[in-house]
Image (cartoon, rainbow, N blue to C red):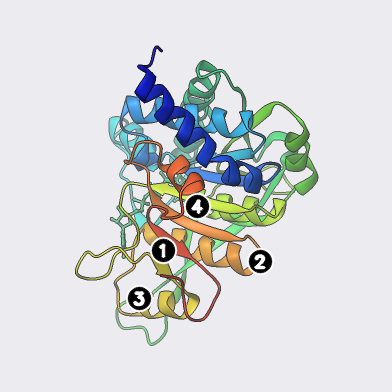
């Protein structure tokens, strides 16, 4: 691309100003969760892939964990299978699990791998079944059933939570050119596959590798209050209150819970950011303002 002398100087200035950020993050691992709802626009997708390649090129170790909820929903609809969620988790019977594995481990995973490779990176697509690096156990959700005094434990099928992540397996990528792209499927000791919410996988992966940042890209500008204002910083106590009064619900619940768990386990910061903004990840890494909501483990919160 040819620049005029003025715009070439602007580019040089931006590059020079990014030096402290490059120095700060070089050698560090960042976990980026790419939500299914943030994957809608082709230009944005290509931009996302390019940003991941840029990170690797300047010495950051990006690990991509992707979702694909809407893409699973589309295929289930084609097959006349109903999509049902409880507390943001898909109720997953055996037929649904087959579709989940096909769409997450097959279609979505390889699309992202392809985009990163097109941008000049070396991506490798994996699920938790590969080398059995994500061990899962069955997840029961709590639901208030009408007439019951306390919430009941509900069995929602082949849905898992992360029991353990093979840190050594993931650390290997830090000394390699390869960029891991992870589909959120786990496996138990007997080899049974589990559908795991992608936010939960991203959080546990970030904890396992001691990530510098966990970035959760979604289709909303951040966590909002009841009036729709974005809450730029949230602490554990504030989150508890927002869940209790129903301000945080549905798909935002697993996001918040994994972000909190990650920062409490030592991940330096967790961010819920708007994947509809071009180069959202670069804005988060290379500017002080950030985009979206920062989750911290401090009592006061960060504004
Ligand atoms: N307080 C809140 N602030 C923002 N979004 C919220 C809030 N509570 C619930 N949500 C919902 O959570 C959604 C994001 O979760 P989800 O659709 O699962 O995204 P993704 O596919 O990126 O994981 C938002 O689009 C919004 O509908
Ligand atoms: C148990 C559960 O709900 N699993 C999710 C996995 C995909 C996902 O998390 O995708 P997003 O990040 O795009 O929402 C699902 O089946 O939709």
Residue denoted by label 3: 242
Q: Is residue 104 visible?
A: no
Q: Quadrant of the C terminus?
A: bottom left
Numbered mark located on residue 265 in the image: 2
Q: CA distance from mark 4 to mark 2?
A: 15 Å
In the rendered structure, the answer to whether residue 233 lies left or right of residue 229 reads: right
Q: Position of residue 265 (x, y in %)?
A: 66, 66
Numbered mark located on residue 125 in the image: none
Say whether disc 4 or disc 2 marks the residue closer to the N-terminus.
4
- Tell me the element at label 4: helix
Say whether disc 2 or disc 1 marks the residue closer to the N-terminus.
1
Q: CA distance from mark 4 to mark 1?
A: 10 Å
The residue at 34%/62% (across/down) is 223
In the rendered structure, the answer to whether residue 30 lies left or right of residue 217 reads: right
Q: Is residue 54 above or below residue 241?
A: above
Numbered mark located on residue 253 in the image: 1
The residue at 34%/68% (across/down) is 248
Asked if ligand 1 lies within 8 A of label 1, the reply is yes
Residue denoted by label 4: 199
Q: CA distance from mark 3 to mark 1?
A: 10 Å
Say whether disc 4 or disc 1 marks the residue closer to the N-terminus.
4
Query: 191 or 267, which is in the foreground?
Result: 267
- Tell me the element at label 2: loop
Labelled pair 3, 1 in contact (Cβ < 8 Å): no
Labelled pair 4, 2 in contact (Cβ < 8 Å): no
Say whether disc 3 or disc 1 marks the residue closer to the N-terminus.
3
Q: Is residue 225 above or below residue 149?
A: above
Asked if ligand 1 lies within 8 A of label 4, the reply is yes
Asked if ligand 1 lies within 8 A of label 3, the reply is yes
Q: CA distance from mark 3 to mark 4?
A: 19 Å
Question: Dot 3 surroundings within 10 Å: few (below 14), some, or many (20 or more)?
Answer: some
């Amino acid at each position: 691309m040819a620049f005029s002398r003025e715009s070439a100087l602007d580019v040089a200035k931006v590059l020079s100003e990014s030096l402290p950020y490059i120095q700060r993050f070089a050698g560090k691992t960042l976990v980026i969760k790419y939500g299914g709802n943030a994957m809608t626009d082709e230009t944005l997708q290509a931009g996302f892939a390019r940003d991941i390649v840029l990170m690797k090129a300047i010495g950051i170790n990006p690990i991509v964990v992707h979702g694909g909820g809407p893409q699973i929903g589309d295929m289930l609809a084609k097959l006349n299978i109903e999509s049902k969620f409880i507390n943001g988790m898909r109720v997953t019977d055996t037929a649904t699990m087959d579709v989940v594995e096909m769409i997450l481990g097959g279609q979505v995973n390889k699309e992202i791998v392809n985009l990163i490779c097109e941008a000049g990176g070396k991506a490798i697509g994996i699920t938790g079944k590969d080398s059995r690096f994500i061990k899962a156990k069955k997840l029961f959700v709590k639901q208030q059933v009408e007439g019951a005094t306390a919430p009941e434990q509900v069995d929602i099928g082949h849905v898992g939570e992360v029991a353990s992540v093979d840190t050594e397996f993931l650390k290997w990528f830090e000394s390699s050119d390869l960029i891991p792209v992870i589909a959120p499927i786990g496996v138990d000791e007997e080899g049974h596959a589990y559908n795991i919410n992608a936010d939960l996988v991203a959080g546990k992966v970030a904890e396992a590798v001691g990530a510098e940042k966990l970035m959760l890209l979604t289709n909303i500008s951040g966590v909002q209050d009841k009036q729709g204002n974005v809450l730029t910083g949230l602490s554990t106590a504030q989150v508890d209150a927002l869940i209790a009064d129903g301000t945080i619900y549905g798909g935002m619940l697993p996001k918040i819970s994994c972000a909190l768990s990650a920062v409490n386990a030592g991940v330096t910061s967790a961010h819920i950011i708007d994947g509809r903004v071009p180069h959202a990840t670069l804005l988060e890494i290379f500017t002080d303002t950030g985009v979206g909501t920062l989750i911290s483990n401090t009592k006061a919160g960060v504004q």
